[in-house]
Image (cartoon, rainbow, N blue to C red):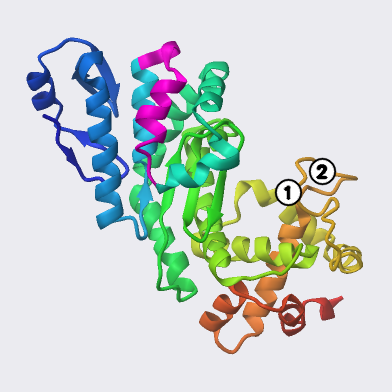
Amino acid sequence: MLALVKCRSIAIRYKYQKAARAAGVSVPILIEGLKLKITRLIWSSLLVIVAASACSAESESSASRALITSDAEVFAGLFRQYGEELSAEELQRYYLEPGSDGIRIFTPYRIIDADNLAKEVSQNRDLYQKAISLCLPVVRSLAEESERIMQEVADSIGEQESAPAYVVFGGNNSGGTASAEGLVIGIETVCNLIDSEEEFAQSFTYLIAHEMVHVYQSRLVSIEGQPSLLELTLIEGVADFIAEKILGRVDFSATARTEYGLNNEARLWQEFKTVMDSTETGDWMYRQQATDGKPADMAYWIGKRIAEAYYNNAPNSSVALRELVGFSDVHEILSKSQYGEKF
């Protein structure tokens, strides 16, 4: 009754005419711009077929280094079909239970459960609608480019065991998470910060590149106890360095700190090195607002400069990138970079 093709790509496409004829019904729903005529009576079985087929096909044939959006497409279909009547029961049955590994990874602390997701959707309908209408189509159009970026990240560090990236709708509290299993992006949160398709496209591709580095860091880096500011700085800085190297540009979110860093590098280093072994991040990382004229997250920029210096001093650039991603001794990296010796 329903044929699902090309699960690996961004778009989940339906042989909708055959489905509509077989259903012989009249309630219109819109999934990916294709109008299907089905009744609520068969909607549940259709969604189960879609979700199960999508996840199965992707996990078997393409979940290695693919951008997987089956969850996001199912959510978008539910949102359009049920409107303001979308309930926790329907989200649980048709979205969470048959979801991909991305849903499994993203549920703890983020989606939390169906009740929380239903509440967030009900209270923030405009936000979820924006993600569906503005940002999800852009994600579809970026499928091949995103997968090329993912491939380049893995190749640049000599990583043979690849990882997928999932795009999902979450609980409006996280733009994504990177683990050894892969990357999961909460599209409604990322889209909320965006004003145009072009801006989202740039942000999304940079996010893919940066966060995929974190996926491989999760596999290669082992830090005992609470990480120091220097360790966190290198983790984020290496991700920025590789992302910029692959994309050939600085992300627009890093423009201010790049300009500030270049104009104040010596002073920043003198301030940073006095606290770099502390486990307190202070105003160096994970702050949304600038302080005393200093842009937020300046440790990202310092980490990128250390990574760049290490890379430029290394006899083998390919080996250097893998050493940066999988560092075991952050002070050895800093010493070999000779970064601090410039000031």
Pinpoint residue 264: horizontal percent, then vertical percent.
Answer: 85, 60
Pinpoint residue 6: horizontal percent, then vertical percent.
Answer: 21, 45
Give the residue drawn at x 40%, y 53%.
146
Element at label 1: helix
Judge left or right: residue 109 versus residue 77: right
Q: Label the magenta part by its dominant secondary structure.
A: helix
Q: Are marks 2 and 1 in contact (CB under 8 Å)?
A: yes
Q: Residue furthest bottom?
A: 315
Magenta segment boundaries in residue numbering? 82-100
Q: Which mark is residue 256?
A: 1
- Which residue is tagged 2? 290
Q: Is residue 92 magenta?
A: yes
Element at label 2: loop
Q: Is residue 341 above or below residue 20?
A: below
Judge left or right: residue 42 versus residue 263: left
Q: Nearer the viewer, residue 322 or 149?
A: 322
Q: Say which of marks 2 and 1 sits in front.
A: 2
Give the residue drawn at x 58%, y 38%.
110
Q: Is residue 212 visible?
A: yes
Residue type highlighted by circle 1: Ala
Residue type highlighted by circle 2: Ala
Q: Is residue 44 above or below residue 288?
A: above
